[in-house]
Amino acid sequence: MPRLQPLQDFLDIALPAMRARAHDGNSPASLQGISEAILSVGDQGAAPARLPVVEAWLDTALARPMEYQDLSDLSQAIQRLTPLLCWRRRTGDATASANFGESHANAMLLGPGGMEERRDLWIGFSLLAPQTRYPDHQHAPEETYLVLSPGQFRKPGRDWFEPGVGGSFFVPPNAVHAMRSGDEPLFALWALRV
C-alpha cells in the first residue's frame, strides 16, 4: 500500500531539512539510516485525534515566519498533515511542571502507534503550551531534534540551552533529556533510529 501523500510530502521536506542541520554527535549517521529506512512503507496506523492543547497552541507555534525556505516549506507541510495526526499525552513525573498533563501533546508519524506503524524508527512531534516543562526522560534509541519554535532543552553535559528556530541537536541512547517552553509554545520534530 502506498504511503499517504501528505505524509510522504512531509517526509520529502523534513528529512532533508533535518540532515542539512545535523552536525551534533551521531545525528548525520542516524538520519542517513532513517532516510534509507523510510524508503519502505509500513502499515497504516492510528486514526486522527486532537487534544485541547493542540487546538489552542499548534497554529500559534506554526505561525512563526521562518528564516529559511526549507523550514517555511516544512511548516506548510506540517499544516497540511495536521488533520491526519493522532495526538496523545504521556504521563509526567516529579520533574514535569504541574500543568504538564493538559499542556502538552505528542504525535507519532512513523513508529509504534503512529500514522504509519513501524518498529525500526520513530518520527514525530512534541508540542508544549507556554510555561510547560516536559519531564526528564530517556529511551534506548538515539534521537535527533529539529526545533521549530523558541524553547529550551537539556541533555547530558549541557545545562538548559536554546537551539533557536531551526536548531538541531543529538541525544545519545539512554541519555536523560528534557524540554521546556517559555512565554511561547514549543514545537519540535524528533527522529529516533531504533
Image (tube, rainbow, N blue to C red):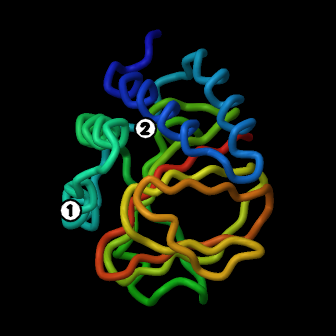
Q: Position of residue 30 (x, y in %)?
A: 72, 38
Q: Secondary structure at mark 1?
A: helix
Q: Residue furthest top?
A: 1
Q: Is residue 97 left or right of residue 121?
A: left
Q: Residue at x 66, y 70 (%)?
A: 177
Q: Residue at x 35, y 42 (%)?
A: 71
Quick check: 99 above or below 158? below
Question: For the residue carrying disc 1, how many other residues have a C-alpha within 10 Å: few (<14), some (14-19), or many (20+)?
Answer: some
Q: Residue at x 34, y 19 (%)?
A: 5
Q: Is residue 88 visible?
A: no
Q: Earlier in the sequence, mark 1 or mark 2?
A: 2
Instruction: Give the numbered dot on residue 165.
Output: none
Q: How many marks?
A: 2
Q: Along the line of sight, which residue is nearer the eye, 182 or 4?
A: 182
Q: Along the line of sight, which residue is nearer the eye, 173 or 118?
A: 173
Quick check: 69 above or below 56? above
- Which of the two discs, 1 and 2, sits closer to the camera? 1
Q: Is residue 77 left or right of residue 93?
A: left
Q: Position of residue 147 (x, y in %)?
A: 46, 57
Instruction: Give the numbered dot on residue 60.
Output: 1
Q: CA distance from mark 1 to mark 2?
A: 25 Å
Q: Residue furthest front?
A: 67
Dividing the picture into quarters, in which one does residue 101 lie?
Answer: bottom left
The residue under label 2 is 46
Q: Is residue 182 visible?
A: yes
